[in-house]
Amino acid sequence: MDGLVEETLRYTPKTEPFPHQAKGTLAAARARNYAIFFEPRLGKSKTALDYVGILSLKGEVRKVLILAPKIAIPVWERQIRLHFPYNYEAETFTEQWGENGNDSLPTVQFWLAGREETFRRVRGSKKSGKIFYQRSKQDIVEAWDPDVIVVDESHEYKRPGGVGAQDLWHLVRRLRKKRGDGRPYVLLLSGTPNPKGWRDLFAQFRIMDDGIFGTSADSFDQEYVIYGRGKRRWTIIAYRKEKKLDKLVRRHSIAASADEVGLANEQFFERLPVTLPPSVVKMYHQLVEEFMVEWEGGVISAKNSGVRRLRLLQLCGGFTTQGEQIHSAKVDALKSYLQLLYLQGESVVVYSRFTAEVEAAHRTIQEVGFVSHRVDGSTSARDRRLAIDSLATRPSLPTAIAFQHQAGSRAIELVGAAETVYYSPPDGWVDYWQTLKRTQGPNQHRPVRYTHLVVPGTVDISVIKSLQRKEDWHADLMRNPRRYLTGL
């Protein structure tokens, strides 16, 4: 595909879009305010970046605010580098970077803001005793005055009375009133926009354009929603005017499923970086140099280079051989990502190397709310069978299994999940390749994603590079030119 045509301008994407992405990009660019509802792993972020590219080429967009879950910010950083064709400057609340190589191209500024921190309120009081809320980071992005606001995982704003939904809606209204030119445009992105029905779309669409369904949730309910009576008075039992609802939604959005676009069983890989606490970084480097390091829980030592490597891997994961917790950085990252998947209704398989990591992953799965299972060397045959059966087909409730690599890499099918998370990857290519295949196969009808939690600049990266080399050897033998791990 040579380019996307928008009126008299010609936009050439940096990376070739799938047909559904090109269609979504053009529809969004023409509408300005729009919603892209693609199932997970169908490329919403690339579609959004091409939308920004077209509008920047037209001279309408120079500043883009991307609101996303904090755990997804590193993914957006990579997506911008991979897909955005023009010069850009990007920043978060803590860092800046950019790419400028062609003076003839427009320069677009991106602000990547974590949803959690942006809409965090601090309670204060005036001398008069009146209570008010400070929204310091909202004030920062409002003063920045974006031309476009991309709302990633927009279903997280589905509660009309929720803090994020209310604050973002009012933020958009204030900016548009001040500018008077209809901007900022709003682009909604979600793979699960209405898990509980049409009403979940009201608050999302109100942020995008409050002229579609109005500003009042009560008015929306009176026109479209039928509630039960008595104990069920807060339960939606049916909808009125569903044809009108469907028509309005489809006029302002595009939707796509994996089966529809022919991407069922496709594989996607991503890396989520984890930052260790400074004290642990110091421990890591000391262990590299001296084969021994002290910490508040005792001493970590290694007799030789091979054992030292294992200790360094344990240090990255956060646990000693005895299961004592050194830090929670990876566990916290895992929890944030699992919370995102849980909200999307996704089931997931989590693979870990060490027993303490499996235990931590299982606890985290339970805390988030998944139907949970644990499978390692100590698991009984009965419990292992129950765990595997829980993801043999897609379950009705989000389900997760914490596996130790060897216990979940052979002769099982887990196609009920389309998400695999590696808390820590195995060294062996056979174990890694086999774990990749558990969520794949002829019975998998969705694209599958493999997410790796890695600590940059550590043995985590060397493990990934080693797996890439082994993958290349495997590909040469099998005469398969495809390299799955390139993105890692």
Image (spheres, helix red, strand yellow):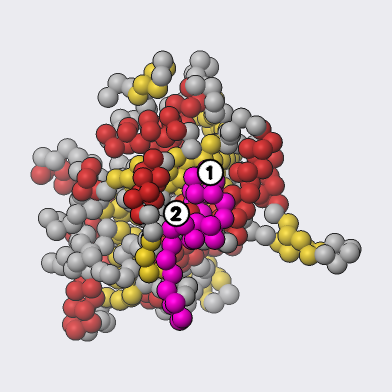
Label of residue 211 in the image: 1
Quick check: can you spot residue 37? no
Residue 117 picture location, percent across and down: 60, 55
In the figure, 7 relative to 334: above or below? Answer: above
Taking the spot 18% from the left edge, 68% from the top edge, the residue there is 392
Label of residue 428 in the image: none
The N terminus: image quadrant? top left
Residue 248 picture location, percent across and down: 40, 45
Q: Which residues are magenta?
A: 203-232
Q: Is residue 221 magenta?
A: yes
User: Few, some or many C-alpha atoms within 10 Å of disc 1 (few <14, some 14-19, many ≥20)?
Assistant: few
At label 2, the amino acid type is Leu
Q: Is residue 157 magenta?
A: no
Taking the spot 48% from the left edge, 27% from the top edge, the residue there is 55
Structural distance between the alpha carbons of marks 1 and 2: 14 Å
Query: Mark 2 falls on what kind of element?
Result: helix
Q: Residue furthest left?
A: 478
**Quarter of image, res 251:** top left
For the residue pair 190 and 298, the one nearer the viewer reads as 190
In the figure, 476 relative to 409: above or below? Answer: above
Q: Earlier in the sequence, mark 1 or mark 2?
A: 2
The image shows a total of numbered marks equal to 2
Label of residue 201 in the image: 2
Query: Mark 1 falls on what kind of element?
Result: loop
Residue 4 horizontal side relative to residue 265, left or right: right
For the residue pair 37 and 230, the one nearer the viewer reads as 230
**Quarter of image, res 418:** bottom left
For the residue pair 455 and 97, the one nearer the viewer reads as 97
User: Few, some or many C-alpha atoms within 10 Å of disc 2 (few <14, some 14-19, many ≥20)?
Assistant: many
Q: Are marks 1 and 2 in contact (CB under 8 Å)?
A: no
